[in-house]
Image (cartoon, helix red, strand yellow):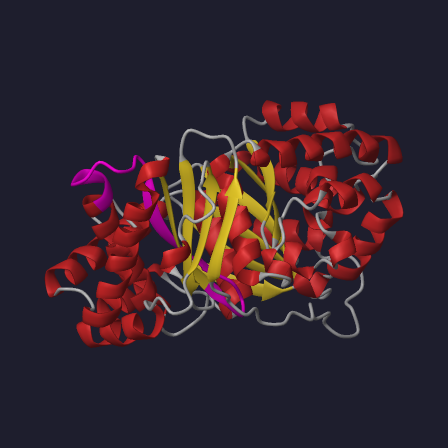
Amino acid sequence: MYRKLVLDNGVRVVTERMPTLKSVTVGVWVNTGSRDEQSSQAGYSHFIEHMLFKGTRRRSSAEISREIDALGGEMNAFTSRETTTYYVKVLDQQLQRAFELLSDLFHHSRFESKDIEKEKQVVLEEIRMVQDDPEDLVQELHMGQVLRRHPLGRSILGREKTIRGLRRQDLLNYIETYYDPWQTVVSIAGNFEQTKLDRLVARYFGKGRAAKAAHTNGRCPPDVHGGVLLKKKRLEQVHLCLGLKGVPAGHQDRYALYTLNNVLGGSVSSRLFQEVREKRGLVYSIYSFLSGYSDGGMITVYAATRPKEVDRVVDLVCREIRQIGIKGVERKELERAKTQMKGSLMLSLESSHSRMSKLAKDELTHGRHMSLEDMLAHIDRVNEEQVINVGRQFFKLDSLAITGLGPLASRSLRAHR
């Protein structure tokens, strides 16, 4: 059962009781991410996420780790381009201790200068790790190419220069600006007693004054650019991203676009997987995915192949994109994609963690709850006429962006512009 309440300080609380489970997951979502940073602040959101685990007034970082292990639970955090999330998953009887621990980290982290200096080295290693992972790196380069100077195009991890130069007060100022109760959602899913849960939420997240007016992020929509970007790197394969304009996370055509993405490269029965890997053996990994933000989105195809097959792989990907844009999809393909999507959706929501995430994303994206039945009905309503119209609008190559990473010749891919 879904329930929403707004605390006196402006924090939104969304809950879903799942009485058949023995677990409960509590998440704190802040509506700020890497896109909300100034260029000189690149990486601050992610760095703050790290620092919340480095000690509070009551606990050292080692004590935090020992306590969550003693609960038999899981505590972690992640930063995206639009949100920063802290969560804990425990057995249902440990709910109060989970709330107390998560609240302590969220409200009372110390941000000691010596810990900040140590964590700078950890984050710099994380940045280097991405540089050594060509699949991650080519996708990061692709975002920067397609979105250019827009904040969404920057790395979530930040740049080495900004990380080395950040100071304690910089982080505290950022928190003061963006960690506003009006921009905070507490999301809980799993087995709990509602009255007790309401008391816990009010006790641990209901303190503090409400802001006079809700802070707005001041975000502006991105423009999506085409073209070709090549970056040479000594690798065995060439890693490729091909990108097209997509839709925002809450767009009315998103279910039709999900369906077309599934047909293109979203599953092992997709056209790209079957044509490029299964029939021709040109790749091991090839897939497509959608990135939806509050005010824009992208369609991206990733593939990795040996250098001499780059142009052939790109030709095949472009052919499938063009065919979907011109002809749409066959009824059999459409029904198979919709069935696969519904199955994946239902399976993905079987855990308390996944339900917690969905609750928060629904609130931040739509301002309301989207039930599983609603989502399945939206998928069912996708028809041939709609996918033809959406395909013609988005699956066209006139603004195609191609990013290549690896042992590339300088003339490679130019003919595909």
How many callouts does the rendering have?
0
Q: Quadrant of the N terminus?
A: bottom left
- What residue lies at 50% left-to-right and 44% top-to-bottom? 138
Most foreground residue, 342 or 301: 301
On-image quarter of the C terminus: bottom left
Across and down, in percent, residue 205 comes to: 70, 53
Percent position of residue 206, x then y: 71, 57
- 382 w.r.t. 232: above or below: below
Q: Is residue 385 left or right of residue 71?
A: left
Relative height, residue 395 to residue 281 (above, below): below
Find the magenta span and give its range. 276-297
Q: Residue at x 37, y 37 (%)?
A: 307
Q: Nearer the viewer, residue 185 or 113?
A: 113
Question: Measuring 70% from the left and 29% from the top, which residue is drawn there?
Answer: 64
In-image side of 145 versus 312 (left or right): right
Q: Is residue 150 rendered to the left or right of residue 264? A: right
